[in-house]
Image (cartoon, rainbow, N blue to C red):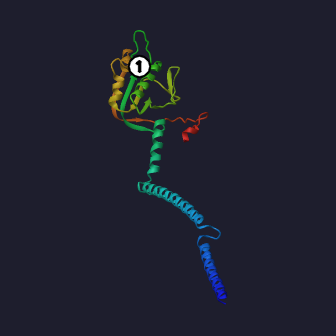
Amino acid sequence: MKKTREYLALILVSIFLGIILSIHFKTVNKTVGEGVLPIQRSQQLAAELKKLQSEKETQLNLISELETKIEQYEKSEADKNVYAENLYKDAMKYRMLAGYMELEGAGVILEINDPPVDVQYGEGYNIVDELDLILQIISILNAADAEAISINDQRYTSFTEIVRASDHIEINGVSTNSPIVIKAIGNPETLESALAIKNGIIWQLRNYDYIVHLKKDKNILIPKYRKIKDFIYAAPSEESFN
């Protein structure tokens, strides 16, 4: 009888422990996931946390970039659209360099008149016969940092052609003759010194009996280049956009 009671007590304790273990197991499954050991679940949670932290950092960086762009846009608007203003200034600069804008400013004016005709022999010579001297003057002015040059009110650019045609010359396709008046915008002192240097171009012209007048001027007007240049064979290279 005593043994029977002991067996019954043992059975009851076993059942009780079994119920407790069953409840505990279900609780663990609900907490860490069914069929997953606590260590494995811990590793999964750590990996997910690391991934979320990485995504959060990426989003924060993106937000920071967007905020910076917004700030730039707001600043540009506050500064009356600085970006558009800079684009406009660049466009004007390149139009000036290409010669497609009328310009004014300080500089020098060089006038070259033909020598007096020899009364006895009725002979004379013309500055239009001296294209090399005219081109030499242009080179000297460019070397002296002239910002704009004109010859008889024809704008001189990298596309300008100066050719002899019978008893006159053509500049940008326009016929002209002596006197030759060359205007240049730049530092007046520098331009004058470059032309009037001892044994320089003005000395050479006067040595050939040309009548030369050189003066500085505070307000020189140089017209724009009026011919349209189309690019048929040339195009921007791909590296220009990199």
Q: Is residue 2 above or below residue 189?
A: below
Position of 77 relative to 119 (above/below): below
Q: Which residue is mark 1?
A: 114
Residue at point 33%, 19% (across, down): 198
Question: Which one is in front, 150 or 90?
Answer: 90
Q: Where, by quadrant of the figure, is residue 197 drawn? A: top left
**Residue that lies at the very extreme toward the front in this rendered image:** 2
Q: Nearer the viewer, residue 44 or 162?
A: 44
Quadrant of the frame with the C terminus: top right
Q: Position of residue 21 (x, y in %)?
A: 61, 77
Answer whether residue 224 is visible to the viewer in this image.
no
Label 1: element kind: loop
Q: Quadrant of residue 11?
A: bottom right
Using a 10 Å C-alpha cutoff, classify the residue at mark 1 as few (fewer than 14 neighbours), some (14 to 19) or many (20 or more): some
Q: Residue drawn at (64%, 83%), measured in percent from left and top?
A: 10
Residue 88 image offset from top left, x and y in percent: 46, 46
Q: Indicate the quadrant containing the N terminus: top left, top right, bottom left or bottom right.
A: bottom right
Q: Taking 26 as reference, is 114 left or right?
A: left
> Residue 123 or 67: which is nearer the viewer?
67
